[in-house]
Amino acid sequence: MALIDFQGVCVDFPIFNSTGRSLKKRLMQVATGGQLSADAAGVVVIRALDKLDFQMRDGDRVALLGHNGAGKTTLLRVLGGVYAPTSGSALVQGNLGSLIDISLGIDPEASGLENIYIRGRLLGLSAADIKEKTPEIVEYSGLGDFIEMPVRTYSTGMHMRLAFTISTALRPEILLMDEWLSVGDEGFKHKAEARMKEVVQSTSILVLATHSRELAMSICNRALWLEQGKIKMDATPQEVCDAYFGPTD
Ligand SMILES: Nc1ncnc2c1ncn2[C@@H]1O[C@H](COP(=O)(O)OP(=O)(O)OP(=O)(O)O)[C@@H](O)[C@H]1O
C-alpha cells in the first residue's frame, strides 16, 4: 500500500546574497511566487511551501495546479526526496518513480546500451532487472543498430526516445510528473502516449503538476490548488478547475 502523509510541511530558501529591501520591491511588482520575509540577521527567506497538511492514498491521481511560483515543483521535489522539509514531516511510503528530468544521468560518451544500464541503476533497478528489461527497451526505442553507438551521435529526438523508453520501463507505486511527457516524431509520439497511459494506470498514486485543465480533468480524480505555498483548495478536478480556470460553458 502506498501512502503520502504531509504534516505541517514548510520549505524555506534562505537567499544569502540579497538584501531584504531589493527583493521586497520586486515582489510588489510581480505579486507571484512564495512568501518573502527577512530573518533576524536580515537574510531574505523565500517560503516556498507553507504548513502543508494532506494525505494521498492508493487510487489518488492528483493534479497540482497553481500559478508560477506557487510551489508545485518544490512539492514534487520534497515528494521525490530532493528537498527535505525545513519543518514538519513528509512521509512517502512506497516505491517511487519520477518522469521529471528523464535525461538526467544519460552519458553522451556511452552507447545506448550502456546508458540503459547506467540509467537503470540510477532508477534503482538491479543488474538482473536491467538485463531482463533491456531487449524490450531496445525494441521499443526503435533505435536499431544505433543502440550500440555513443549517445552523442544521436539526434535530439533519438536521445529523447532512449531516455523516455528507459524511464517508462518501471512501474512505480508512486509516480511524479511535471506536465505530460510527449516525445519523438509523430509515429513515436503515438506509441509514447499509449505507454504513458499504461504507466499512469499501473501506478497507485500519481502526482502531476500541470497548467492544463484538460490534463487535470482527463487524467486525475483529485486536484490541489497551491497558492504562495499553501493549499487553497483540495477537491475534485471539476471543482478545482472551475474555481481556478473559471467555469466552462
Ligand atoms: N532553489 C531555489 N532557491 C530559491 N528559491 C526557490 C528555489 N526554488 C524555488 N524557489 C522559490 O520557491 C517558490 C516556489 O517555486 P516553485 O518552482 O515550486 O513554483 P512552481 O509552482 O513550480 O512554479 P512554475 O509553475 O513557474 O514552475 C518561488 O517563489 C520560487 O522563487
Image (cartoon, helix red, strand yellow):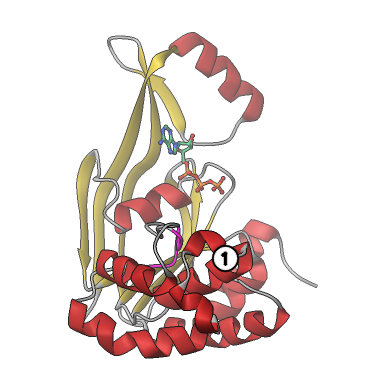
Q: Residue at x 63, y 57 (%)?
A: 244
Specify start and end residues of the magenta stretch as a single range: 98-103
> Could you tell me residue 33's position as x and y percent?
52, 36
Q: Residue at x 57, y 24 (%)?
A: 27
Please say whether residue 163 is visible from this viewpoint: yes
* Disc 1 residue: CB within 8 Å of ligand 1: no
Q: Is residue 129 above or below residue 124?
A: below
For residue 9, side relative to residue 108 (left or right): left
Q: Residues within 10 Å of mark 1 (few under 14, many from 20)?
A: some
> Could you tell me residue 41's position as x and y percent?
28, 9
> Could you tell me residue 44's position as x and y percent?
39, 19
> Could you tell me residue 53's position as x and y percent?
30, 54
Which image quarter holds the N terminus?
bottom left
Q: Residue furthest right?
A: 249
The foreground one among 215 and 106 is 106
The foreground one among 23 and 104 is 104
Q: Residue at x 66, y 72 (%)?
A: 214
Question: In this figure, which residue is indicated by the disc labeled 1?
Answer: 154
Q: Residue at x 80, y 73 (%)?
A: 249
